Amino acid sequence: MTSTMDNSQKMSYHAGEAKGQAQEKVSNMMDKASDVAQSAKESVQEAGQQVKAKAQEAADAVKDAVNK
């Protein structure tokens, strides 16, 4: 093999290596974004459950007041 082929192969290898690292970084960023989204979804669901519980308490209080 000539020296030029070696350089070309090295450049190709390093380009592939850089591409792999970039893909891994993007994948990690997507995982983090997904975790954040899941966390937000859970927070919203939890808040919704709390609102629902408070509404039920209020409805029960009204029923109790009306039935007395």
Image (spheres, rainbow, N blue to C red):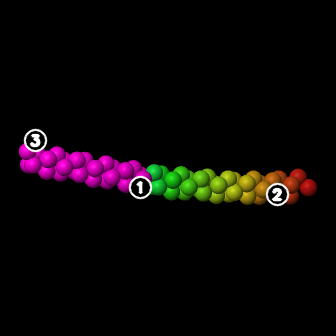
Task: Indicate the position of residue 15 as horizontal and vertical percent values.
Answer: 22, 51
Residue at horizontal 56%, vertical 55%?
39
Instruction: Write the start and end of the magenta stretch as one range.
Output: 1-30
Residue at horizontal 31%, vertical 48%?
20
Seen from this angle, which residue lies furthest top?
A: 1
Q: What residue is shown with label 1? A: 29
Whichever of labels 3 and 2 marks the residue nearer the N terminus, that label is 3
Task: Indicate the position of residue 1 as horizontal and vertical percent values.
Answer: 10, 41
Q: Residue 61 carries which label?
A: 2
Label 2 element class: helix
How busy is the neighbourhood of tag 2: few (under 14 within 10 Å), some, or many (20 plus)?
A: few
Q: What residue is shown with label 3? A: 1
Is residue 43 toward the left or the right of residue 26 in the image?
right
Is residue 60 toward the left or the right of residue 52 in the image?
right
Cα–Cα span, label 3 and label 2? 88 Å
Whichever of labels 1 and 2 marks the residue nearer the N terminus, that label is 1
Q: Quadrant of the C terminus?
A: bottom right
Q: Which mark is residue 8?
A: none
Label 3 element class: loop
Residue at horizontal 22%, vertical 47%?
13
